[in-house]
Amino acid sequence: MQYKCKVTVIDKKCFSDYQSQYLANPSAGPCTFYQTGDEFIFERYGGEDTFQLAGDGTQCAEAWDCISRYIYTALQGGSIMRGWTNNERMMIACCSDGTRPVIFKIERLDYKVVKIDGMVCTNCANDVKQSLEELSGVICAEVRLDKNWAEVYMDKNAPVSDEALRLVIEQFENYSVTGID
């Protein structure tokens, strides 16, 4: 099993009364870095490490300081907040700006990487994606033709076996599964 972390901006607040009372710029207004609905995916697989690069201008430093520990936990496959939220794979957190906080939903995404030999074109990738998504328990599949693999996201209550994944791919005579992580 592999893990990604999806971070979604679910709300922004602005406390103008606190801003006018305490800030050097009393009309600072709401956060301008994030917008409600913004989504960010963090991953550490196959040479990708977007967690390490997040401080490179893609995230506000104040927010990153508050949410990075939850993202790191998710990327390691851990429980983000067992017993606090109704889903241990999810956390609601906010940045530390007391006059204009941004609220984030942080989700651990569990998936398997199916390495596939024989995919050479977009039609191949579409065939694989459609076949994987027809499997019971598969929420969605993303085919990375450039990497020769498919990322298969599954329902946590209905995991799909490696053998089922292998069979659905190898039903096509030109494709073979070379590994599943």
Image: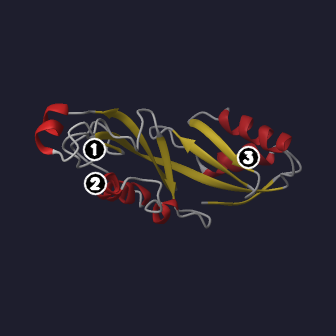
Side of 13 relative to 127 (left or right): left
In front: label 3 or label 2: 2
Mark 3 in CB contact with mark 2 (< 8 angstroms)? no
* 1 sits to left or right of 164: left
Q: Quadrant of residue 16?
A: top left
Q: Which image quarter holds the C terminus? A: bottom right
What residue did someone put label 3 on?
167
Side of 45 where 20 appears, left or right: left
Q: Position of residue 131 (x, y in %)?
A: 73, 36
The three-letter code of the residue at mark 2 reads Cys
Q: Label 1: state its secondary structure.
A: strand
Residue that appears at 73% across and 34% down: 130
Neighbourhood count class around disc 2 (C-alpha, 10 Å): few under 14, some 14–19, many 20 upward: few
User: Residue placed at 43% from the left, 62% from the top?
Assistant: 55
> Is disc 2 in contact with disc 1, using a CB cutoff of under 8 Å?
yes
Residue 66: give its label. 2
Disc number placed over residue 93 in the picture, else none: 1
The amino acid beneath tag 1 is Ala
Q: Please name the residue shown 31% across and 40% down the image.
A: 102
Q: Residues within 10 Å of mark 3 (few under 14, many from 20)?
A: few
Q: Position of residue 21 (x, y in %)?
A: 10, 39
- The disc at residue 181 is none
Residue found at x 26% / y 33%: 13
The quadrant where residue 122 appears: top right
Q: Quadrant of residue 61?
A: bottom left
